[in-house]
Image (cartoon, rainbow, N blue to C red):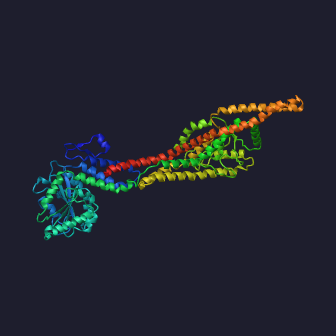
Amino acid sequence: MVQPRSPAEAESGAWGAYRWVADGGRRAVGGGLRGRLDALRELIALSRTRLDGRTLEGAGRVLETADERYRLSGEHTVVAVAGATGSGKSSLFNALAGANRSQVGPRRPTTAEPVACVWPGSRPGADGLLHRLGVPAHRRHVPADGNTELRGLILIDLPDHDSSATEHRAQVDRMLELVDAVIWVVDPEKYADAVLHERYLRPLAGYAEVMFVVLNQVDRLPGDAADQVVDDLRRLLDEDGLALGEHGEPGAAVLALSAATGRGVGELREALGQFVAERGAADRRLAADVDAATERLRSAYVAQNGVGLTERARAEFDDRLAEAVGAVATGRAAERDWLRYAEHACGSPWSRMRRWRWRGSRRGAGGFGAGADDGWMTGAGATGAGVGRGEGRAGAGQTGAGRTAEGRPGAARGRRGRAGARWSQDGRAAVGQVCAGHGEEGRTGTGRVRTGRNGAGTEGLTASGRSGRRQGLVERQWAAGHPGAGGAGEVGASAVDGRAAARPVVEHAVRTVAAEAAHGLPAPWAHAVREAADRGAYGLPEALDKVAADAEEALRGGPAVKPRWWTVAASLQGMLSVLQVVGVLWLLGAITGVGDATAWISGLLPAVLGSVGGPALAWMCRVVARGPARRYGQDAERRLRSTAAACGRARVLEPVAAELLRYREVREQYAVASGV
């Protein structure tokens, strides 16, 4: 008997509308086959968005066939008798049935409709199978002798597979896909027929375990000719790739008989009886169907070699993004800025006064616009950092990142503050939003406009990553470091060219990592990996430009924590300056007669000590500052590099890794479905 499935089982979609029960009329599918069918079902579900419907159509039909077959009787085994015109298959059908159930005659084709002979089993259920096969009710018979040796057998006499009627051939092809086993009947004249071997036996070589090949009409062969024909038939079957069941090995059974005389029919009946009693034909047939379906899908799931992104490929991708944002140039500019800050903090008051005076003259000459920052601007600004300006890219006389025409660091006044701390803390959260595709610039190609922080006007960020704000920074620093610089047009063009030049670097990095990830993958999955990389690359240059701009902005205020020795050096410089002033005044008093003329010697010592000690102390501070400055620059480079890498991972590497993980999942399901 059969019982309806529970709602949970019905929802899971396993095995159609019914389940197997221990005392029911159908036998539960073997655990191995059931696991393979479940894996094939999961494989199709995971692949629908990656493979076209035509590729998965055959596997879907196998699942439908399995569901339909297991909904019907498991007590019966359906065996078809197939053969060419005049091979004697209807005569063999009648010999097994014990009566003339199928018409035999000289007219060709004789069998126009399938004829069935059903050996009743212990439970009913044959009608559902016959209805599935399309056997008319008036063509369904029972054996004449009532022999129980073949209990549960449903024997089907098919039309001729080489019939001149097209509908007969189509009916044979359809029913061969639905029966559990096939008895191929050949005769001494047509056993080597190319149509039989090329159209049926060779493509069905994987179904050898549910196949019988019978050489009929051996009574027409004299002497030992029958043995010779059987040997030649075995040779042809071996060339077709059909495994032969010899010496207890699984495969097709090859028999020689004569349906007219009854010679060898008993041997076939005995083999059929054992075959039906095993109740395993349906499982073996469906297992062969799954084998054929998975073999057709092999090229879509089996990679040529190991797949995945290597650490070397990831590192190269990170390096290219670091190159695109100018991480090295930013680090070196930050190092120079640290030295500049140290020089300013540890220099003599006279040197600071000279800088302030020069800055005032530049402002009066219009070197700074109304929107210029009132603080220390770092040399990192001149790198055009971000997607655009790499180290060593000179334009319009600019020699490098943050350097003036004279080769000195081009420092300018800007805002002070704890910018380094903002970069290490708040900056990364903001960068994370940008890298996730939710940054300020978004993904539009129309750009955005907002008011600048210092009244500098509007700021435009377009899909090409050309930031008006970033260009303004370069222009202002160019003006600050180049008193004789011309208009800003050339500078702006240089900055834009730099950013445009970095876009190919990003695109090349994405193409390279996508090619590395897709290498060796089957074509559909390689295409999916490349598409995932392309989707992630959209907006990546703009996101990297934002990352670099934030890094540049964070470096403007200089070190977040000023070293204590700067304060000590500044105090010493003040003391030395006081000595210098006192000594000079003492000397002036001695020279002008205000004081004792012989007291000039007492004033000479503090004057010399103040004049020589200040520059000497400044020189010593520059020497001492090299190590911390180098570490500061390296830290700035490392932060920008890691942030750019995180942006690349979020937009490109993680989607690519997700596609590779999906492929591994379907590859595992394919391995289970194929029985590997």
On screen, residue 125 versus residue 552, left or right, reads left
Q: Is residue 167 visible?
A: no
Residue 378 position, x and y percent, is: 66, 41
On screen, residue 417 versus residue 90, left or right, reads right
Residue at 60% x, 35% y: name it: 421
The quadrant in which the N terminus is found is top left
Residue 503 position, x and y percent, is: 57, 51
Question: Along the line of sight, which residue is nearer the eye, 64 or 651?
Answer: 651
Question: Along the line of sight, which residue is nearer the eye, 174 or 281?
Answer: 281
Where residue 556 sits, quadrant-wise, is top right
Q: Is residue 269 visible?
A: yes
On screen, residue 76 versus residue 13, left or right, reads left
Residue ranking furthest to the left? 145
Residue 606 position, x and y percent, is: 79, 31
* Number of numbered discs overlaid on the protein picture: 0
Residue 452 position, x and y percent, is: 65, 41
Residue at 73% x, 33% y: name it: 573
